[in-house]
């Protein structure tokens, strides 16, 4: 729910500038907040937030978003994206044995 909404707002086509999520039992501020360019105010009071740390939360919305952007960039650098490799590349072939998926000769006609 919440993350999907934020992901949808990241395009900038919906200029959300303020979000009130007071007393919503939020324990972690989603990293997706950093991807909503128009977001200037997030009201987080009365939530049992464990992340980001209290010293970040106490400095306000701009610092929270900066913290989340830095974390997002760090994670993006730490996880190199590998291009998907096709199972069979051009010029290569895979030989499938004639008996593939068939019972072995000794098992034919025998049912358990």
Image (tube, rainbow, N blue to C red):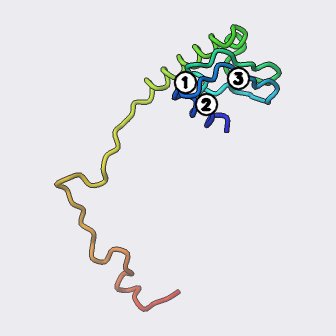
- Residue name at image x 53 percent, y 25 percent: 12
In three-dimensional space, the C-alpha distance between marks 3 and 2, rounded to whole angstroms, equals 11 Å
Residue 64: image location, x then y, percent: 64, 15
* Farthest-out residue, left: 91
Which one is closest to the eye, mark 1 or mark 3? 3
CB-based contact (under 8 Å), mark 2 and mark 1: yes
Q: Hey, which quadrant is residue 63 in on the image?
A: top right
**Residue annotated with mark 3:** 19
Between residue 56 and residue 99, name the one nearer to us: 56
The numbered disc on residue 35 is: 1
Q: Element type at marker 1?
A: helix
Q: Residues within 10 Å of mark 2 (few under 14, many from 20)?
A: some
Q: CA distance from mark 1 to mark 3?
A: 14 Å
Q: Give left or right: position of 5 versus 70.
A: right
- Tag shown at residue 6: 2
Left or right, 91 with reference to 99: left
For the point 75% across and 20% down, which residue is it?
Answer: 44
Circle 3 packing at 10 Å, graded few (<14), some (14-19), many (20+), is few
Mark toward the start of the polypeptide (3 vs 2): 2
């Amino acid at each position: 729910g919440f993350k999907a909404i934020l992901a949808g707002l990241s395009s900038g086509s919906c200029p959300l500038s303020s979000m009130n999520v007071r007393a919503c039992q939020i324990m972690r501020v989603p990293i997706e907040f950093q991807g909503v360019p128009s977001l200037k105010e997030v009201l987080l009071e009365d939530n049992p937030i464990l992340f980001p740390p209290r010293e970040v939360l106490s400095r306000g919305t701009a610092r929270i978003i900066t913290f989340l952007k830095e974390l997002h960039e760090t994670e993006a650098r730490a996880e190199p994206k590998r291009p998907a490799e096709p199972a069979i590349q051009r010029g290569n072939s895979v030989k499938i044995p004639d008996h593939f998926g068939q019972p072995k000769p000794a098992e034919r006609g025998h049912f358990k």
